[in-house]
Image: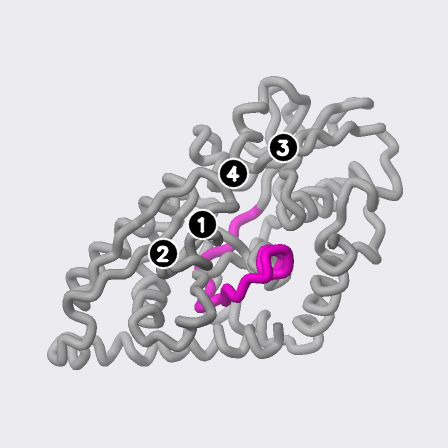
Amino acid sequence: MKKFLKSLGVLSLAGSVLVGATSAVQAQGEFEGETVTVGVVSEAEEQVWEFVSEQALEQEGIELELVLFTDYVQPNVALQDGSTDLNAFQHVAFLNEWNEANDGNLEALGFSYITPLGVYSESITSIEEIPEDAVIAIPNDPTNGGRALLGLELAGLIEVDDEAGILPTVADVTDNPLNIQFEELEAAQIAQALPDVDAAVINNTFALDAGLSVEDAIFLDAENPADLPDDYKNIIAVNGDNADSELFAKVVELYQTDEVAEKLAEASNGGDVPAWTEEGEEEGSDSSESEETTEESEESEESAE
């Protein structure tokens, strides 16, 4: 993780230098006529990448072809088998877990955004109103499910075994005074199940697709998303065989701009914030914190197998 964080920081800094040299690149026509396929998983992300696509074509002559997926599995399958060149939907922890489970070689090419994970309800207006024996839906994949449980711990509803690290499961809940019942569902389906449960922990992209916003949440796991561990920062991923591609690095550079940051805020109703900012890089540069987080992630992934 330490090496990974440094590489992302270098990429972001390099991007800021290269922006000043855009005219030179244009004059050379280095990437003119190139096509890059990018997998995304929500309409909000698709909106952002449509904007990036316009900038890529106008500034560099690069055509971005967007592929919209409806789950969290197929985007990485497509990236691994070469059907797509990049994808942008997951955080570091999810990428690591997927690689471990599927013997994959996907890598993070650059940070994209950070988003809080929210608890939503159609019948409850505050987290303090969660009743005894409440049914709460959470994602059934290890990383988002683990983050959901840690969020509910932050909300004061449960306690989770610290030894589980960043990937706890329901079995790691050590204290559950309200006897909450957890309904584990595919992340993309939780918003549709909201009327049938007392509350649900919903990924922001799927919440947006369902007409919800962070303002509708009764609890968010990070009032300041930049305080989240780097494991929960979203990234632009690439097949490891293509990690050194200058073309793909250029696409990341085109994404990591102030204009895209504004588009992120617009498309997410203010929920998503850029993860490539100077503040984010400074946090990621804390080697002791990064190494500790990585060790916890690796231990958790091994125990999950």
Relative to 290, residue 233 above or below:
above
Residue at horizontal 45 percent and vertical 79 percent from the top: 10
Q: Earlier in the sequence, mark 2 or mark 3?
A: 2
Give the labeled residue for mark 4: 214
Whichever of callouts 4 and 2 sits on the residue coming sooner in the sequence is 2
What residue did someone put label 1 on? 75
Mark 1 or 3, nearer chain start? 1
Q: Are marks 2 and 3 in contact (CB under 8 Å)?
A: no
What is the secondary structure assignment of the residue under circle 3?
strand
Badge 1 amino acid: Pro
| Region of the chain picked out in magenta, as a range | 96-116
Q: Residue at x 58, y 71 (%)?
A: 284
Q: Kindly identify the amino acid type of the residue bearing the numbered disc 4.
A: Val
Q: Badge 2: how crowded within 10 Å, few (<14), some, or many (20+)?
A: many
At numbered mark 1, what does the secondary structure look like: helix, strand or loop? helix
Tags 1 and 2 in contact by the CB under 8 Å rule?
yes
Quadrant, the N terminus: bottom right
